[in-house]
Amino acid sequence: MKLLVPVKRVLDYNVKVRVKADQSGVDLANVKMSMNPFDEIAVEEATRLKEKGIATEVVAVSIGPAQARDTIVTALTIGADRGILIQTDQDVEPLAVAKLLKAVIEQEQPDLVIMGKQAIDGDNNATGQILATLLDWPQATFASKVVIVDGEAQVTREVDGGLQTIGVKLPAVITTDLRLNEPRYASLPNIMKAKKKPLDVKTVADYGVDVTPRLKVVKVTEPAKRQAGIKVADAAELVANLKTAGVL
Amino acid sequence: MSVLVIADHDGTHLRDTTHKTVTAAQGLGGDIDILVYGDRVAAVAAQAAAIAGVRKVITAESAELKQELAEAVSALVAGLAAGYDAVAVPASSAGKNFAPRVAALLDVSLLSDVIEVVDGNTFVRPIYAGNALETVQTSEAKKVLTVRTTAFKAAGEGGSAAIESTPAPAASAKVRFISEEKVVSDRPELGAAKIIVSGGRALGSAEEFQAVLDPLAAKLGAAVGASRAAVDAGYAPNDYQVGQTGKVVAPDLYIAIGISGAIQHLAGMKDSKVIVAINKDPEAPIFSVADYGLVGDYKTVLPELMKALG
């Protein structure tokens, strides 16, 4: 069974987000970039399926600037076998990302796509669902457990108020939630090995997909800053204040 | 202009997220219809018909719709979308599951997690877990948006819309419902709670986490949350995690106990109406966003707090 795992290079989740003064976006110059945490969980899950003998090959795909190569190498370090970078400096919207992935999938013919439920930059939580729709494959989003049985993925999903388990016939698209697994730390031998794994670089034009943005970003602004409030001396004063504020 | 709002309900009661989505839809202008899907939804449909300003309520019933299978719901909504200029979906886990499919079926861009409708084509949405706000303009003929309902007031009651039914789409053979486990708890869900009591690594152990937070949460009728540090240390289950990679919450009252306030935690709770921080380190970053800060050891503060709450 062949697995495809899309991975995105994003601002590291521990870095403070700074909005550019000209309101054109978030400042990504000279800051630490990392693999989207949910994608890391996806690569880990794919690697575990390979280690269990269920999957035979894991292909990592990234769409982004030249530096997204590092993100693919991270995937190769965790356990992916080879990588495809579709290099572009444009900000590609979820619909166009899904169309590019669909084109890759038509060439690669994987049995299963595992990807993060959302990227922590755009927070759209959409690409996996859009991809499944375009492929007419079933989807299992927000996965906290994945079991493969007889050509079906049985996926436990995190939904409001609890868990839901569904069975999706392969090929299918699964998106990961936080509880699915804890990604491993990179070991030095695996870092060395990753550097020798194949990594193809492609362009958007290779796939004939129109990635022109559909949405115009008018501005990106900082949310209203919270003012630090007051310090209270003790619990009684706290409760009195909360009652005045009308929240108790 | 006409907008189709998708109802959020538990089978018996319409959730107020529906009323809030109606308010967001009113920002687009035009007539508003509500779709109630599920199984035996007559009672919920009647509640939807009572929302002020609603033109019509449409019901659709089938097993797959009750199970909220995304394939079934998106086929239904995309089919109905032909008659509307926009579809507005509450950004619940179900809404997030099917709304992108509706957009894909219509070949339009999804507007995700909208917090403000500026005009019929312009929307504000949080990015980077709310650390930045993006104003986007769309020129799509049809708009599909999910609505972060905490950002909108609930529409009032007093309507008496007509109710009609539409057939459910055929079931997909590629997906089947196996089971569900809904947490049976007297406590509200983290995402819908008006009060959240949240604990950090300072609590030191899973036993202490429970012993400290459970009585307080029970007293306040609050949901329990945790920082990533507390989750990583094994003090609280993963689904308690509030933060950029966990749940983003905006309750009326958020009480952070022994949480230092890492960036990624603040990203998940800083839109709460009132924030209380209890921490023994006066320099903890959590105090910079707290409306009320109490510097002290939770071990002495919490018993006093329980007493003060009566």
Image (tube, coloured by chain):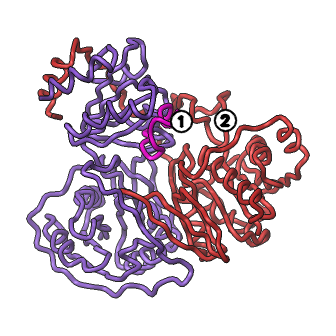
Q: Is residue A86 visible?
A: yes
Q: Residue at x 66, y 44 (%)?
A: A183
Between residue B70 and residue A177, name the one nearer to us. Answer: A177
Of the chain colours in the picture, the one used for chain A is: red
Q: Residue at x 15, y 75 (%)?
A: B161
Task: Tell me the magenta residue range.
Answer: B228-242
Q: Colour of chain B?
A: purple
Q: Residue placed farthest to the front in the image?
A: B207
- A188 w.r.t. B289: above or below: below
The three-letter code of the residue at mark 1 reads: Asp
Left or right of A187 in this view: A5: left
Q: Could you tell me which chain the residue with mark 1 belongs to? A: B
Is disc 1 placed on a helix, strand or loop?
Answer: helix
> Is residue B130 in view from this perspective?
no
Q: Position of residue A126 (x, y in %)?
A: 52, 59
**In the rendered image, which quarter is residue B271 located in?**
top left
Q: Position of residue A41 (x, y in %)?
A: 63, 49
Q: Which residue is mark 1?
A: B232
Circle number at residue A33: 2
Give the position of the C terminus of chain B as an image quadrant. Answer: top left
Disc 2 sits on a residue from what chain?
Answer: A
Front disc: 1 or 2:
1
Q: Kindly identify the amino acid type of the residue bearing the numbered disc 2.
A: Met
In the image, A208 versus B215, the foreground residue is B215
**Among the 4 quarters of the image, the one containing residue A228:** top left
Residue drawn at point x = 65 percent, y = 29 percent: A31
